[in-house]
Amino acid sequence: MPRVRTAVPIPLDRRFPATDIASLAQAYEASGVVDDVLLWDQLSWFFPPSLWTPENTPLAAVNDDAHSFPDVFVLGGYLLRAAPKLGAVISTDAVRRGPTELMQTMLTVADMTGGNAIFQIGAGEAKQTKPFGWKRSQGLKRLEDLFKITRAYWEIPGTIDFEGHHWTLKNASVGSARGHRPKIWALGGGPQLLDLATTYADGMAYLAPNAWDTPERAHAEITKLKAQLEEKGRDPETFEFGMWVQAVLHEDPDAITEAIDNPLMRWMAANFGRVNLHDWEALGVESALPPDYHYAMHLLPLEVTAEEAQRVVERVSPEQQRLSWMAGTPREVGELLKQYAEAGVTWFSIADVLPMTIPPDDPADALRRTIEVCSVLRGA
């Protein structure tokens, strides 16, 4: 099996002491099978206030909302000091941070990690942009500007001029220091974004099973993207293909059934169990939301009333619940992911969402299960 990199997302809330988050990163580092930590640059999470209750999640007993995120660029530096052998993967968007400022950050993190730094950048989500005065509709054009500007900064150590869709630079410079090159990936989907990715990016990340629901589909999409890279004169073997795995891990099938029936899990299944809701039609499953709905463009969780949230949750069928997750024992999920690796996926982020829904018998079990998936995937 090809060599792959593994990543684990770090749970983020400003109520969590930074020392505890650092201890978690150190545990992943000590495992020997986790390469990277993944940090989400977010202001809003997915859940309406009416669903974030102690009845639905043990986290609500200590966190009275789901949206108190820290600044991950600051936190990332702290975690790298605590666990220096880990690489850093930061996901963000091209709307809320200027390309010059982001390039300065990316160069810094790349040097801190000895080059093990990936920045996965998308066109933005409505929930991260609209409430705060940004226009999500500008996302693709801003992403194109960002790709072009950051490439120019890397290749030209002096000053650059740039005339783009939203940015105009004149005699702009981030200085001549060039250490390790940050890797910049595209995050998301759609023809325009994929065209930008294969033109400018170092890699691409997808959700699974939400977009790549089978290894065969992953292989078909990767083959298509590699052909685009070759047509543009790029070496497809230097391009990375990543996958955010939405997992529900447990040795007891009843625990998995209980978890995916949770209203929070039903809400997520409705909104992005398939990112393209038309994909449900091909599976013979009725979507709980209109087929033309897309969570990135439409979801504003703090505007969803309790009645609206309840109607959506009640419409999610058992089949839609089941197909929205990679569920099973750590070994079962790890073996499935090995098939994706054979299909061409080179980087995996394993997010076990089960602990959000039921109190663990032992909090260390969730850590153990995630590490076991990485161990199986790495053949360790």
Image (cartoon, helix red, strand yellow):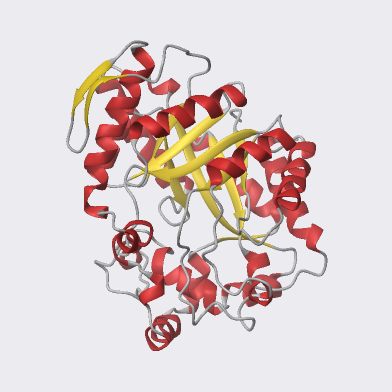
Where in the figure is residue 367, as x and y percent of width and height? Answer: 75, 53
- Write the residue at 41% across / 63% down: 272
Where in the figure is residue 158, as x and y percent of width and height? Answer: 33, 10
- Residue furthest front in the image: 171
- Write the residue at 40% across / 71% down: 301
Figure quadrant of residue 337: top right
Please name whichever residue, 199 or 226, is drawn nearer the observer in this view of the structure.
199
Question: Which image quarter holds the N terminus?
Answer: top right
- Residue 305 sits above or below residue 126 on the image: below
- Residue 234 sits above or below residue 44 on the image: above
Question: Which image quarter holds the C terminus?
Answer: top right
Figure quadrant of residue 279: bottom left
The reply to whether residue 79 is in sight is: yes
- Write the residue at 21% across / 40% down: 141
Where in the figure is residue 207, as x and y percent of width and height? Answer: 45, 51
Instruction: Using residue 262 as the reference point, say whether residue 149 is left or right of it.
Output: left
The reply to whether residue 344 is in sight is: no
Where in the figure is residue 29, as x and y percent of width and height? Answer: 74, 37
